[in-house]
Image (spheres, rainbow, N blue to C red):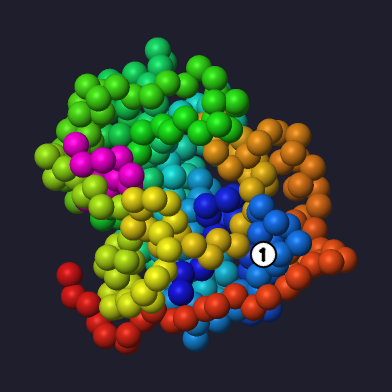
Amino acid sequence: MILNTGNRTDIPAFYSEWFMNRVRAGFVLVRNPYYPGQVLRYRIDPDVVDVIAFCTKNPAPMLRDDYMEELSRFGQFWFVTITPYGKDIEPGVPDKDEVLDSFCRLSEYTGARRTGWRYDPIFLSDRYDADFHIRAFEKMASRLSGYTDRVVISFIDLYEKTKKNFPEAAEVSSENRLLLGREIARIAAKNGMKVHTCLEGTDLAQFGIDTGGCMTKEVLEEALGEELVVPAGTAPARSGCRCLLGSDIGAYNTCRHFCRYCYANYDRGTVLKNSAMHDPSSPFLIGHEMPGDEIREAKQVRYSTGQLRLF
């Protein structure tokens, strides 16, 4: 099974000590975000976990020899999001040169196949116009060349939380999507990278972009070099999505990057209130067990067949 850490919050950036404590303990307790009294207990054990998937804007707190040695028992796949926006959009994200350096260090630990770059979401404004994105992408791609073989792009989605916190955001026009897709594909190829999109339609496929998804079974097989068999009936994360995004151990309203386009935070006050309840020794990311909690064992099935895949 795939144990995800990054759909609801940024665990490597803000909760690395807690996460490594859970790895050592061999389990984690996760509240249902919609029915908090329902709790799943996941084993963190290589016998049942094929891949631990990370998605972060700052992997630096995890880049310790002892942490990475402990994680080497598991299959891993990392996405590091690096965009060109300033503090006006991403106030809690470290300096981008620092994140680029951290990406390269992470790749040296895990390998280029297991370390992907996310350049998303893309939105346009007077300050961040199409030419700005093309120049920024080229500079970043040149820095990451040889440290990854894939980059995921997406255009901003106007979720309700996004519209609340970033009301001036607008959808990217079809004309600009095609312009940016073409140029990003060209630059990525020059730097040894394949471009992927997820739930963005197929209009960018004409530029050689893989529009099939960002963390699909095939992507993970390429990263691990192993064949995976996903049990029949495994539900997709979203309608039309082929990515294996279930089994997330994070919690919404806990990420302190405070990106204006974020879909996972309601508001700053809620995030700070929840973060104050974090205890690195707790089996829960936020708080502790409460009266009335119903704790169930999660169904975990190993996907790997043990057969090697060559690409």
Residue 60 visible to an observer of this rendering: no
Classified by dominant secondary structure, the portion drawn in magenta counts as: loop
Q: Residue furthest front?
A: 233
Provide the residue designation for mark 1: 30
> How many numbered discs?
1
Q: Quadrant of the C terminus?
A: bottom left
Q: Residue furthest top?
A: 126
Residue 248 shows up from this direction: yes
Provide residue 270's location: percent of width, then percent of height. Answer: 74, 39
Left or right: residue 298 compared with residue 74 = right
Across and down, in percent, residue 216 comes to 33, 61
Q: Amino acid at mark 1?
A: Val
Is residue 277 positioned above or below 187 on the image?
Answer: below
| Residue nearest the viewer, comparing 251 with 92 | 251
Above or below 173: residue 43: below
* SS assignment at label 1: strand
Task: Identify the image quadrant of residue 43.
Answer: bottom right
Look at 69% across and 61% down and name the residue there: 31
Residue 210 image point, x, y percent? 21, 49
The one nearer the camera, 99 or 236, is 236
Q: Which residues are magenta?
A: 194-203
Q: Residues within 10 Å of mark 1 (few under 14, many from 20)?
A: many
For the point 64% across and 78% down, the residue is 297
Q: Is residue 74 left or right of residue 31?
A: left
Q: Position of residue 281 (x, y in %)?
A: 77, 67
At horizontal 18% and vertical 75% (from top left) the residue drawn is 310
Q: Between residues 187 and 4, which one lies in front from this camera angle?
A: 4
Q: Residue at x 60, y 25 (%)?
A: 164
Q: Is residue 219 magenta?
A: no
